[in-house]
Amino acid sequence: MNPEMLIHCPYCGVRNRLEFTVRGELRPSRPCAGAPDAARQFEAFVYDRENVAGSTREYWHHSAGCRSWLVVTRDTLTHDVTAVALAGETP
Amino acid sequence: MSRGFRLPAGGLVDRSQPRAFTFDGRAYNGFGGDTLASALLASGVRLFGRSFKYHRRRGLLTAGPEEPNALVELRCGARREPNTRATTIELFDGLEACSQNRWPSLRFDLLSVNSLFGSLFAAGFYYKTFMWPGALWELLYEPFIRRAAGLGRIADGADPDRYERAHAFCDLLVIGGGPAGIAAALVAARTKARVILCDEDFALGGRLLSERLEIDGMPAAQWAAAASAELASASNLTFLARTQGVGSYDGGVYGALERVADHVAQPRRGQCRQRLWRITARRTIYAGGAIERQLVFGGNDRPGVMMAAGVRTYVNRFGVAPGRNVAVFTTTDDGWKTAADLAQAGIAVAAVIDARKDVDPVVQVLAGRAPIYRGAQVADVRGAGSVTGVDVIHEGRRFAMPADVLAVSGGWSPQLGPLTHRGHRPQWRDDLASFVAPSTGPDVLVAGAAAGSFGLADCLREGAQMSVRALADLGFATAAPAAWSTSDESCGLRPLWRVQAARTKAFVDLQHDVTDRDIELSVSEGFRSSEHLKRYTTLGMGTDQGKSSQLNALASLAQLTGRTIAEIGTPMARPPHQPLAIGALAGRRVGARYRPCRRTAGHDWAVSKGATFVDVGLWRRPQMFPRPGERDWQETVSREVRAVRTDVGVCDVSMLGKIDVQGRDAVVFLDRVYANSVATLPVGRSRYGVMLREDGIVFDDGTIARLADERFLLSTTSANGERVMQHLEFCAEVHWPELDVQLTPVTEQWSQYAIAGPRSRELLARVLGPAVDVSDAVMPRMCARELTFEDAPARLMRISFSGERAFELAVPASRGKELLRRLFAIGADLGATPYGSEALSVLRIEKGFLGGAELNGQTTLSDLGLAALMSKEKDFIGRVMAQRPALADSSRPQLAGFRALEPHRPLSAGAHFLPVGARPASERAEGYMTSVAWSPDLGSWIGLGLIRHGRARWGEVVRAWDGLRGTDLRVQICSPVFIDPEGARARG
């Protein structure tokens, strides 16, 4: 059990979730504008979401901390946070 | 008469502590340890209020927080609190309370005629009756409903009291101070764990205070007092009395409301009235107890019909006789205990009427000498004002029996409230005919009656066991829990959901006046789900949230739809579990503390010049600088505008977002986030820039200044500074982590002032002195320079948001106020005039520059006439999506100017554009006005707006129709640039 929803920021350590702002689920990397089907790819990139019931990866911003963008692995059913990584270092 | 109901001895009230109070203006007396309810009952008061819809007389039903009837307004004036439950109000000296929902008086209520029109108020009556015509809603229906059906009145003024928020952390949280909660707390108090125990009552013990039970050979109340003393002395345990759990949230977070000073006339100096706790617990033991259920029979809402356990509480805890001759109607063994307790207190028991045929002989003994009717039911209650007798049906015979109180016991419903807030559904248990608390995972353990263990011995044992288990789980060593010896209790029951033989109105939800017939009606109309039933009949939607009524309703629904109660399930429960004052939620965040306020360095200076202010985001921004003798705001703003157009004005623009961007890849990065080109911007120059959202809609605009090869300063709109920063950080870290770019928000580090007008260069030259050349040759339009001013870094940009020759000078925030003073001291003879956001807005509208109303999250660059600005040479955020055909369609509303044909009649932002002569209808709307201003230069009201094919329609006349403000004006479409369309002034 995760007592209180805590997020282990790679820079700042274990912090209360109230310091963070959630943006939404992790997306594949931004499509290339020059691709022949760029319009379709961007449409999927902007609008499609998995909306998983269970473990999902999301972007969180440590907005009241180091201001890093993080990728947080969270269970949407239990709100358990199982992994946190810097977004820039997430493949 | 008025003193006749206090028993000569007994109870836990302190008879040496008299308490004087008033109810509906009449003086009464009670004792310390009384509740308002017990003191009034002791004084012979039966009538506590009028019911919600029918205005029926209502008395006390219970002795606890589940009370649906006895709602009163507590205190008066600004401290008046409506809908407080008389059963939970701890009596204090000088208490003032009033009955509510009666007009003109409690005894004589004109609106009780509502009862005669019962069919009018049946289930769904709001939906059916007040459908048509819609225009009558405001005139007739709403005022009527508000007067006829309603609860108390809110306070007369702003709440004078203070409320606090508090945070706490513990290993073990125990919710509930009854036998199970006490047992759990005692075990935990003897360890090193950090423990919080909260109980909503003012005395610890729960049911132990109300029953003639024994623990370890002593009366239960005495045992509770000893336990309370032990817990109070434990240094690792915090006992929060008068504290109710209001909600449970993810991660072991609980909300609890502590009534710090509700039991005194007013809080002491510096004391808060209530404190809202946010408790984070590693483990929780929930011991919230159970609530006794009402039975559904005719007239079950009459004053004098009371819950059997409540009757025991009044007798045993408060030393009050609820009546002189009490009949008991029960389907449980509990009812018989009430008969025994009444007899023990010397109160006559008219009869024990048990719906069950087979009752344990040991239990039957409890009735003493009172007549017993087994397999019998009470069908109806007699008495117009309050109970005078009951109609009993026994062995096919219906007969009347005199009684002044009917004690009812329909079984127990475990209290689940906060436990189900996280979506867990309660579980049905056939043997208890009840839903019990669900298992919500290892962090929450349920003990005692909430878990369906109703006997005292079980409660104590379970409380202790759960505590041991939770603590062991956390690694705390516990001693073997004490085995407490207790008196025996019998808890048998068989449910009786509805008395079919009832001839008069039988209520399911007393607070919202929902009868068994309403449930039938709503089922016959197709509402078969408990959630639909709830919304259609409003059952369980009162301030008591149907705590005592819900299961009877579900049982009726089950029976009517041929399903089991388990299949139907309970409606979803949401926080708060008990009514909560908004003030408690707000805490200290009221008035000036409602939200943070950001002030610029020049704030005090602006105040000293008589400025008025406006909030933009969190910024407090000078709005205008009125001078004595000016008639209205328009005169002030027009003067400020003219000053800028003819001489020079100075405006604080420090609140514009400022972001410093550096790095080897700064140019590449900015080219990807701005729609326009950045690579072509030379060092020392600035340029207007627009960012799009990835979906192609305009996000924000501002300026980009290139201070060095790899160093830029961006400005954003005042409201979007933080959002743009977050967006850029996302782009840098998520989209393109490979780019070398550093982003720093510097909004608050710099004070920045717009110096605008034909004489701005002169003023600037005077301030900066001969060392800085501000001539056109050195400082052309869009020039951006760093310089040293008074031994500190400064920045100077020649940019204009007014259309005049204009500069923006930025200095470190610590120097801002001094610079302002200098500017006006040195520029007095030039006519230097401070101007605020209103004049700024007029100036930009006259020039067709965009503001928040145009960049409203719905417009594209092509809507705004800026399509040419989009670079075709590069990719950038929003480029692909902006090309979607529908977004570039010229039939989308496009930016245009609008000039009033009657120049002096004010235009309004938000007005819809309609063809002249067309009837106002949404399908005819062609767009809307976004910004309007009185232009002193043009002597006319002008506006910017978005209208279909706008750029191709200059010269055409349309209507600006505003249904909200009731205006309908003709306007001529024109260029959005009203003044100096060639831009000569800004260059000159």
Image: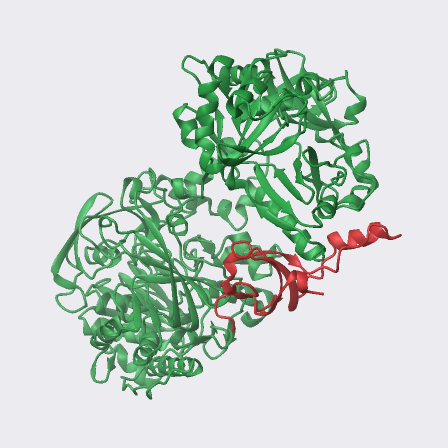
Chain colours: A red, B green
Q: Nearer the viewer, residue B88 or B960?
A: B960
Q: Position of residue B113 (x, y in %)?
A: 40, 42
**Residue sitting farthest toward the right:** A36
Q: Position of residue B369 (x, y in %)?
A: 23, 77
Q: Where on the picture, by quarter, is residue B798?
A: top right
Does the image show residue B835?
no
B887 relative to B4 in the view: left or right: right
Q: Where on the picture, by quarter, is residue B85?
A: bottom left
**Residue sitting farthest toward the left:** B16
Q: Position of residue B570 (x, y in %)?
A: 53, 65
Q: Quadrant of the C terminus of chain B?
A: top right
Q: Where on the picture, by quarter, is residue B300?
A: bottom left
B384 relative to B220 in the view: left or right: right
Does the image show residue B117?
yes
**Residue sitting farthest toward the front:** B771
Q: How many marks?
A: 0
Q: Nearer the viewer, residue B902 or B631?
A: B631
B10 relative to B286 in the view: left or right: left
Q: Nearer the viewer, residue B246 or A61?
A: A61
Q: Position of residue B611 (x, y in %)?
A: 44, 25
**Residue at coordinates 60% horizontally, 26% vertically from top-left?**
B807
B340 relative to A5 in the view: left or right: left
Q: Is residue B828 above or below residue B912?
A: above
Q: Quadrant of the N terminus of chain B?
A: bottom left
Q: Is residue B25 above or below residue B215?
A: above
Q: Nearer the viewer, residue B907 or B561?
A: B907
